[in-house]
Amino acid sequence: MQREDRLLEGAFDTHAHGHPEFTLGMGPRVDNIEWAKLASAAGMRGFIVKSHVFPTTNVANMLRILQPDLDIFGGITLNPPVGGLSPLSVELAAQTGGRIVWMPTWSALQSPPKPSIFRERMKPWITTLETDPDSVPDLGILGTDGGLLPEVVRIIELCKQYDTVLATGHLPIEASLILAEETEAQKVRLLLTHPLSGSVGASTEQQRTIVAHGGTIEHVFIGSMPMHQRMDPQRIVDAVEAVGAEHCVMGSDAIEAWNPPAPEVLRMFIGTMLAIGVSEGAVHAMTHENPERLFRLDARPISPSTQEAAQ
């Protein structure tokens, strides 16, 4: 068995998109059920289902019934379709099994807007952004005084109450740093979403600051794919080495038909990291132990092949 296949056994994908998604006209290579079957066939631990549009708790619950050998969880992204920065939406998502809350993504207030998934790029799919712009506001988390909005503080409190992860989404990194101060104070688990992406663009020092506040750094492979940023994977390696693999997780962020299914994207990510020189132990930590700790998964016995890879 190839090293990347051994390390994919028991791995947990922290970030992948189901269907339907905002790219309705460009669906993924496989539907959600086939995605789960592929993950099971690869021996994966499970995955998080993300959507930029709707809560994914219902999808995750159904997939878990269909594929009970996997840990599959959903969450909610606080974009306008779910009410934006809505404590009510957060609580309902948590009560229906959500394990993660993402701050705004395509609706995140950025000045100037950054490339990747942001409001202007969404207009071909969401016509109301053109026809009814006032009904779809850009969402920021800071008030005029530079502090967190009251509803954001309440969302953090709910994440603590329901023991969910809070992810930064596509917020400007400066806002995420302020968010990190409050999550540290409230003892809420914070995940910095794909810091090297065009939508975030966090520096090494900013990533270190997130870690200093108790946060975890999430790296995804989609940015290195041909139809996205074509980012040199060495940048991911450098970022991991700067903060330590013990503070990072790896996800596919798989979406759209021109990419392989999520389990294969994660396998490619694992194989690429190994080829560049990242140790098997570090890759194992970022795909097994760290996601288990972040999402409060009950640790499972490590299979003999995976145990060998981790050593």
Image (cartoon, rainbow, N blue to C red):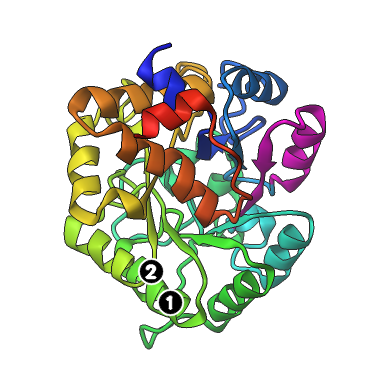
Q: Which residue is mark 2?
A: 214
Q: How many marks?
A: 2
As drawn, the label of residue 184 is: 1
Image quarter of the C terminus: top left
Report the span colored magenta: 56-77
**Foreground: 309 or 131?**
309
193 over 45 or under it: above or below: below
C-beta proximity under 8 Å, tags 2 and 1: yes
Q: Secondary structure at mark 2?
A: loop
Residue 118 is a magenta residue: no
Q: Residues within 10 Å of mark 1 (few under 14, many from 20)?
A: some
Q: Is residue 142 visible?
A: no
Residue 138 lies, in percent from the top left, at 48, 61
225 over 235 or under it: above or below: above
Q: CA distance from mark 2 to mark 1?
A: 6 Å
253 over 248 or under it: above or below: above
Q: Residues within 10 Å of mark 2 (few under 14, many from 20)?
A: some
Residue 75 is a magenta residue: yes
